[in-house]
């Protein structure tokens, strides 16, 4: 790999495995579990948004509820990375899926019975965000344990296809359910999806991972990597993960880009999007717009399966400028046909980036530290999201919805140009650094 991987390891191309990711049984269960979980979870943002609007009619209240979940998510993510590097990741995912099912079931009950209040929704959002913070690093790092290194890109693309397909179905069905029978029943579907995902995660059969309590063996990852062990403290694990995160400039530069980009995009689409929909084309049509983005994500995954540019990370980072289109169109032309096209193109760009990003991390970061690096990535990427969610409503109230959306679009473009202009991002290639992951083969 050219660019600054930050290590002294040699560079080779991973041997090609012609069987494909689906030949590996563990990967098939992972694909089924993650697809099932997202099928229900795609309904939740739509259902929760309109549940809050039905309750108070306030965009500021909606921003407060979604921000509470995001704040808890960011606060717990680093510890989630430590947990995922210390324990069996499949066990972590079973537990977090069942916990998420419980929290969402309580929210659904409150909404259906008319007992929901903003403070209660905030508290439950905090709990749900904390659970998600433990599951996210484990799920991201688990991919590298289910297929050989040569199959990481197609495996990530297939996973993303499953996630996007589940999102399309969930968002489309969720919008109809919310419009016909109310948001509470959409949240019931979310809880059921998490529960079934927990059952599917329990079917994973992973090879023994060195350094976990199940083996007690020493870590055998990269010579520059640092694993966790029962004798190390949580702070030591966090410090080692931080060193792995900061020693590669391309990692923290892209994370800094997404700290800015996510705040602008999420604030614009999650908070102001439903407000624009309520004032123009309606709630059911907003579900179609959200579904268009997930269709774009699916198309992006198909493109990534076929298109493997040598400088894939730079291509993906640059394409993130396209995600300014749906934000700008919400302000300039809030009509369903225009928004469907804009959100679809934004989804394609986002997915090509996401697959290149996962491949870059999984191919160049030691497996023993991968969940912690993912957790720092997620914290950095999400840290400013609550600011975008909290301030989008008041900013729209003070300056107007259209000017606020256009400023958010400009912020997305500026952050993207700054990131793609850096040498570390432009020079990174798709070759695998030897020693970045263990050399064991992963059987079906």
Image (cartoon, rainbow, N blue to C red):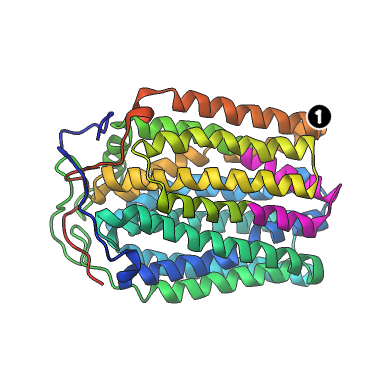
Report which residue position mark 1 lands on. Answer: 398
Relative side of 412 to 277, left or right? left
Identify which residue is drawn at 24% across, 51% down.
368
**Residue 285 on image: x %, y %:** 78, 56
Identify which residue is drawn at 80% across, 42% down.
334
**Residue 34 on image: x %, y %:** 46, 65
Q: Is residue 148 magenta?
A: no
Answer yes or no: is residue 113 visible: yes
Identify which residue is drawn at 66% across, 65% down.
107
Relative side of 153 to 438, left or right? right
Answer yes or no: is residue 99 visible: no
Task: Identify the image quadrant of the N terminus.
Answer: top left
The residue range painted magenta reads: 265-292
Residue 403, above or below 238: above
Q: Is residue 277 magenta?
A: yes
Snapshot quadrant of residue 83:
bottom left
């Amino acid at each position: 790999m050219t660019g600054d991987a930050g290590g002294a390891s040699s560079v080779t191309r991973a041997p090609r495995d012609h069987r494909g990711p689906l030949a590996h049984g563990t990967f098939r269960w992972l694909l089924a579990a993650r697809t099932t979980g997202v099928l229900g979870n795609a309904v939740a943002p739509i259902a929760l948004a309109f549940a809050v609007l039905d309750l108070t009619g306030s965009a500021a209240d909606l921003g407060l509820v979604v921000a509470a979940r995001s704040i808890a998510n960011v606060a717990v993510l680093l510890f989630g990375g430590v947990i995922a590097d210390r324990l069996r990741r499949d066990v972590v995912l079973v537990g977090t899926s069942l916990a998420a099912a419980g929290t969402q079931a309580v929210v659904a009950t409150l909404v259906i019975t008319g007992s929901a209040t903003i403070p209660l929704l905030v508290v439950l959002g905090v709990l749900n965000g904390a659970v998600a913070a433990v599951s996210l690093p484990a799920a991201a790092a688990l991919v590298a344990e289910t297929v050989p290194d040569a199959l990481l890109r197609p495996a990530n693309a297939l996973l993303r296809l499953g996630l996007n397909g589940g999102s399309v179905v969930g968002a489309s069905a969720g919008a109809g359910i919310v419009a016909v029978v109310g948001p509470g029943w959409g949240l019931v579907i979310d809880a059921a999806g998490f529960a079934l995902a927990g059952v599917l995660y329990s079917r994973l059969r992973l090879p023994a991972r060195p350094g976990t309590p199940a083996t007690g063996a020493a870590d055998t990852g990269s010579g520059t990597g640092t694993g966790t062990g029962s004798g190390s403290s949580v702070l030591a694990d966090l410090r080692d993960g931080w060193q792995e995160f900061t020693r590669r400039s391309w990692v923290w530069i892209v994370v800094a880009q997404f700290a800015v980009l996510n705040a602008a995009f999420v604030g614009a689409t999650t908070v102001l999007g439903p407000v624009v929909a309520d004032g123009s084309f309606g709630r059911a049509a907003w579900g179609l717009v959200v579904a268009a983005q997930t269709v774009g994500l699916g198309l992006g995954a198909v493109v990534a399966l076929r298109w493997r540019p040598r400088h894939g990370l730079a291509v993906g980072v640059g394409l993130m400028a396209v995600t300014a289109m749906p934000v700008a169109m919400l302000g300039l032309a809030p009509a369903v046909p225009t928004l469907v096209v804009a959100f679809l193109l934004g989804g394609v760009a986002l997915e090509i980036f996401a697959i290149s990003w996962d491949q870059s991390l999984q191919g160049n970061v030691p497996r023993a530290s991968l969940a912690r690096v993912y957790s720092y990535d997620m914290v950095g990427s999400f840290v400013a999201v609550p600011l975008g969610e909290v301030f989008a409503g008041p900013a729209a109230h003070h300056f107007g919805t259209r000017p606020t959306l256009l400023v958010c679009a400009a912020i997305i473009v500026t952050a993207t140009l700054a990131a793609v202009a850096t040498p570390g991002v432009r020079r990174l290639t798709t070759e695998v650094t030897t020693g970045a992951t263990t050399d064991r083969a992963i059987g079906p």
